[in-house]
Image (cartoon, rainbow, N blue to C red):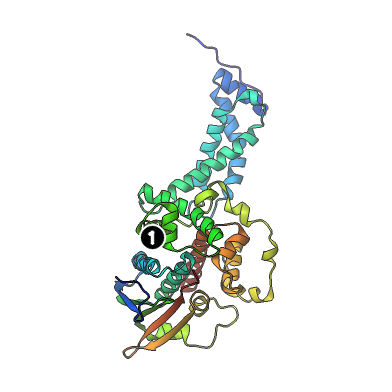
Amino acid sequence: MTEPHSPQPELVELETPVGSEWDPVVRLVLGGVADRLGLGFEELDDLQLAVERLLAEAGAQDSVRIAFELSSDHVRTHIGPLQEAPIAEALQGPPSAPGELGLRRVLETVVDAYGVEEAAAGELVVRLEKRVGPR
Amino acid sequence: MTTSAPAPGPPGAPDRELLRRYHEHGDVSAREELVERHLPLVRSLARRYAGRGESIEDIEQVGAIGLIKAIDRYEIDRGVALTTYATPNVVGEIKRHFRDRGWTIRIPRALQELNVKMSGAVERLTVRLGRSPTIAELARELDATPEQVLEAVEAGSAYSPVSLSASPGNEEDLDLMEVIGTEDAGFERSEERASLEPALGELPEREREILRMRFEEGLTQTQIAERVGLSQMHVSRLIRRSLESMRDSMAD
């Protein structure tokens, strides 16, 4: 693999069954990506938490594809397709109400940006972005 | 060789007398009386470790072993009260128990050791660099490969979060219940933080404070760790456990 500073983002993809027993696999791959990119230990932990909470919120589904786009100053993670209903409810409603500590507030805290993209009918892909801090 | 059985002491004999009868005359009934007498101390200490995935009865039994060891090792000439001598023995036995039971799946010892060193390395490098270290920097600090560092971090996830007293790294002998229980100026409640109150519901106070700091005040894990006197890695584990616990409660 070349240095992750080329103009074109480099792509790492993983397709994994969904379930907490598979979280370690996702965390290890994320760790490798973080090492490659020079992401700080705490930034890695934030991103791992974001992905874990998102998958926990996604509800029952067999598998999911996770794609990491590595650029020189950030990593963009695409997770999906996910069932639309639970994700839309968690992310696309009104802003976090007082007293709520749901997925939206978690993502707002631990990643620099996130968004939702339409996939096939009834499915969504969630995009998480984490910037690499100054080194 | 014949030995004469020691005369039974009066009920309610001082600890010192019972200890002397046991150590100098082999009077096991004196030892039993000492154990019985100090079981309330064991129960009191055991209660501090309740709610960590072990039944209180099991913890009390482990604590009782610590008490028996203290009675057996007690040196009459030291002149220390038995309760003073026994307390660290009981607490130590309980902590060892949690430490030994803490790894929920079998993790190679080398990885466990690396994980334990990791916390201290993260703290040192964070101070030295003024930011969170990268995996490569941690690997250099620990004389390990990045893959070993990642495996050791993952091994830490297999460490049961019930083992709050078995903190990683140099905090090994630090009881988190004691640390977290102290007042801190940073813990003063604000209206903003109070707005999370309904969601935090049934979490223990320290976890609620940590979640407020992270998701209301927006403090980093490192900043929270400094405030509450824990390692960043431990704060991370507490946040994860709390979020999972909240989600489980909502699902019920």
**Residue A25 placement (x, y as % from top left):** 33, 66
Of residues A11 and B24, the one drawn nearer to the viewer in this rendering: A11
Rendering quarter of residue B82: top right
**Residue B31 placement (x, y as % from top left):** 56, 28
Name the image quarter holding the N terminus of chain A. Answer: bottom left
> Residue at left 50%, top 60%?
B233
Rendering quarter of residue B80: top right
User: Relative to B75, does residue A124 appear above or below in the rendering?
Assistant: below
As drawn, which residue projects farthest toward the top?
A: B1
> Residue at left 60%, top 69%?
B213
User: Relative to B7, does residue B213 appear above or below in the rendering?
Assistant: below
> Residue at left 39%, top 77%?
A71
Q: How many marks?
A: 1
**Residue B3 placement (x, y as % from top left):** 52, 12
Could you tell me which chain the residue with mark 1 belongs to? B
Of residues A34 and B203, the one drawn nearer to the viewer in this rendering: A34
Of residues A38 and B41, the one drawn nearer to the viewer in this rendering: A38
Rendering quarter of residue B221: bottom right
Q: Which residue is mark 1?
A: B150
Q: Name the side, left or right, on which A80 lies relative to B69.
A: left
Of residues B81 and A69, the one drawn nearer to the viewer in this rendering: A69
* Whether residue B24 can be seen here: yes
**Residue B185 placement (x, y as % from top left):** 70, 63
SS type, badge 1: helix
Three-letter code for the amino acid on which mark 1 is drawn = Leu
* Whether residue A61 can be seen here: no
